[in-house]
Image: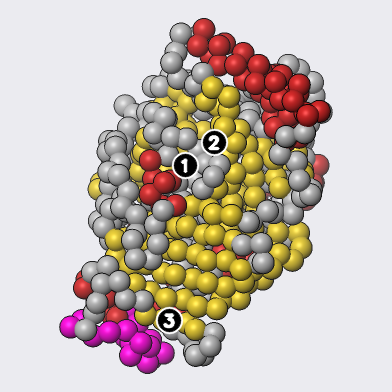
């Protein structure tokens, strides 16, 4: 560290110690950063988007991931300065990633191109695969993959690359793709790496109990299509669950060291999760700005009333990846059925949600103009829409311009987890990539959206936020991150400065 930076670094350390002392004075041995429940505020902790993305280094899953299908996996990707990469994908037979099935070793090259014209805040990339190899960890996994290949004509020609069950040897690597030998069996297996075509890197500080906040780096890669048949052709417009830097990840993370130290011959076996019964009662809010396919940025807030099995939800839509520029808000409500254990995803619960009423609030001029140009009978009935004013759309059976249909039923998949820090998470089924609704049992999700965070106990009042005011209206903001943390973020960014361009996402709640 340059000598000129030493005094500033000392100030940062003192600020961190001051924060830890203040946290301890509250009377808790653990920092509790609960989001505000009246309205989701993903900007409570400053987030830095790294532009252009810095991919060099190892990136890992922080837990067991669930992909549509369902598929259960963990990932470990390493990117090198010469644009080469090596990726491990470890697949499992169970949703807790404790029974390895097979591992994929993927090698190739990636080249960043330009800022995405479709998904704001993302960077488009090209990739080329040099090698894809598979290692089986059980006879059952070998039979499963062979059966999938035999389902198609092209796949049947690929089975000769795999061993017979009697000839299978643990630890043997069988090539599915080789740039030197030519030919590929990845398509027949339904495998692609199109996730590498859309990239975003973020940094933020994770508060620590009685310690200086820790740097966390996240790598967002393109989403996986929910329809298996579309995976080969789909180019991502959203993200999947982010990887985190093996050097700068959230803590504590029992799975991180296991995944970072694994390879295709030694897949990680994750520690058993803490089983949580599905108790929906309370308020659940987005942990940050969420990105959906087809360029949708939003935050969600749900309130579940356990005794009456009723629910309310507020969906705040934005035009930017930092969720700073609101476009419209949808408030919806209805009832849900008693849950049943899922037969496809062990540990998950299947429910049916009925949506019976909804309100819409336009939050910008473009949305207001679109609603005013629509047929009154298609959204809200007679009357003029204005920015910041909520209108009931129940009488018109929804709002056709916004794709809202009332009444309707959605078949959902729910699961609860607890983080190592004791925070309760609620996973709700992933929406179909084509933008449709899971309105039949056959379309029930088999994977999840970004988790919601519990921010309140038993719900006693409405989930609806206070009446929205037009953009530009003043007024104080309650809560937020203490000023010392904001200074620490800015200081840390200076201490870790490099040649990359930085885009600092505004943080109104920090002021």
**Image: 445 above or below 371:** below
Left of 415 or right of it: where is 487? right
Q: Secondary structure at mark 1?
A: loop
Left of 296 or right of it: where is 165? left
Do the CB atoms of the residues marked 2 and 1 lie less than 8 Å apart? yes
Residue range of the region highlighted in magenta in the rendering: 148-166
Q: Residues within 10 Å of mark 2 (few under 14, many from 20)?
A: many
Please report whichever mark, 3 or 1, sits nearer to the chain's N-terminal start: 3
Q: Secondary structure at mark 2?
A: loop
Q: In the rendered image, which quarter contains the C terminus?
A: top right
Numbered mark located on residue 451 in the image: 1
Quickly name the residue at label 2: 287
Frontmost residue, 249 versus 369: 249
Quickly name the residue at label 3: 176
- The residues tagged by marks 2 and 3 sit, at their Cα atoms, a distance apart of 39 Å
Q: Which residue: 18% across, 83% down?
A: 166
């Amino acid at each position: 560290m340059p000598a000129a930076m030493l005094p500033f670094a000392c100030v940062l350390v003192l600020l961190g110690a001051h924060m830890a002392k203040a946290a301890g004075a509250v009377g808790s041995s653990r920092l509790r950063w609960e989001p505000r429940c009246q309205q989701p505020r993903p900007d409570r902790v400053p987030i830095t988007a790294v532009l252009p993305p810095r991919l060099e280094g190892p990136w890992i899953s922080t837990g067991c991931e669930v992909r549509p299908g369902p598929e259960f996996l963990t990932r470990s990707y390493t990117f090198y300065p010469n644009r080469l990469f090596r990726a491990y994908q470890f697949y499992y037979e169970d949703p807790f990633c404790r029974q390895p099935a097979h591992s994929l070793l993927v090698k190739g090259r990636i080249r960043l191109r330009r800022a995405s014209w479709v998904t704001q805040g993302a960077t488009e990339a090209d990739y080329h695969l040099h090698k894809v190899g598979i290692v089986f960890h059980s006879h059952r996994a070998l039979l499963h993959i062979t059966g999938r290949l035999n389902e198609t004509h092209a796949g049947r020609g690929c089975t000769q690359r795999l061993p017979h069950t009697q000839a299978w040897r643990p630890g043997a690597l069988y090539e599915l793709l080789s740039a030197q030998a030519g030919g590929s069996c990845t398509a027949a297996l339904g495998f692609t790496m199109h996730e590498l075509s859309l990239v975003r890197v973020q940094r933020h500080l994770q508060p620590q109990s009685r310690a200086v906040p820790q740097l966390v780096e996240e790598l967002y890669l393109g989403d996986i299509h929910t329809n298996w048949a579309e995976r080969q052709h789909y180019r991502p417009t959203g993200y999947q669950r982010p990887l985190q830097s093996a050097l700068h990840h959230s803590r504590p993370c029992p799975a991180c060291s296991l995944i970072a130290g694994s390879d295709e011959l030694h897949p990680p076996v994750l520690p058993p999760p803490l089983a949580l019964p599905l108790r929906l009662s309370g308020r659940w809010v987005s942990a940050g700005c969420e990105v959906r396919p087809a360029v949708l940025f939003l935050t969600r807030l749900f309130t579940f009333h356990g005794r009456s099995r009723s629910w309310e939800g507020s969906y705040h839509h934005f035009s930017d990846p930092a969720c700073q520029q609101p476009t419209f808000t949808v408030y919806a409500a209805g009832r849900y059925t008693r849950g049943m254990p899922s037969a496809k995803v062990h540990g998950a619960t299947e429910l049916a949600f009925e949506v019976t009423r909804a309100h819409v609030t336009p939050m910008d001029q473009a949305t207001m103009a679109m609603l005013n140009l629509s047929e009154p009978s298609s959204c809200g009935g007679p009357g003029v829409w204005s920015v910041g004013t909520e209108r009931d759309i129940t009488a018109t059976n929804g709002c056709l311009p916004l794709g809202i249909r009332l009444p309707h039923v959605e078949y959902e998949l729910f699961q609860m987890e607890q983080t190592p820090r004791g925070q309760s998470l609620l996973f709700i089924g992933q929406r179909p990539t084509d933008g449709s609704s899971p309105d039949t049992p056959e379309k029930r999700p088999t994977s999840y959206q970004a988790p919601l965070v519990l921010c309140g106990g038993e719900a006693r009042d409405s989930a609806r936020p206070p009446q929205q005011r037009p953009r530009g209206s003043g007024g104080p903001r309650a809560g937020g991150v203490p000023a010392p943390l904001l200074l620490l973020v800015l200081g840390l960014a200076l201490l870790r400065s490099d040649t990359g361009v930085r885009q600092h996402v505004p943080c109104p709640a920090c002021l």
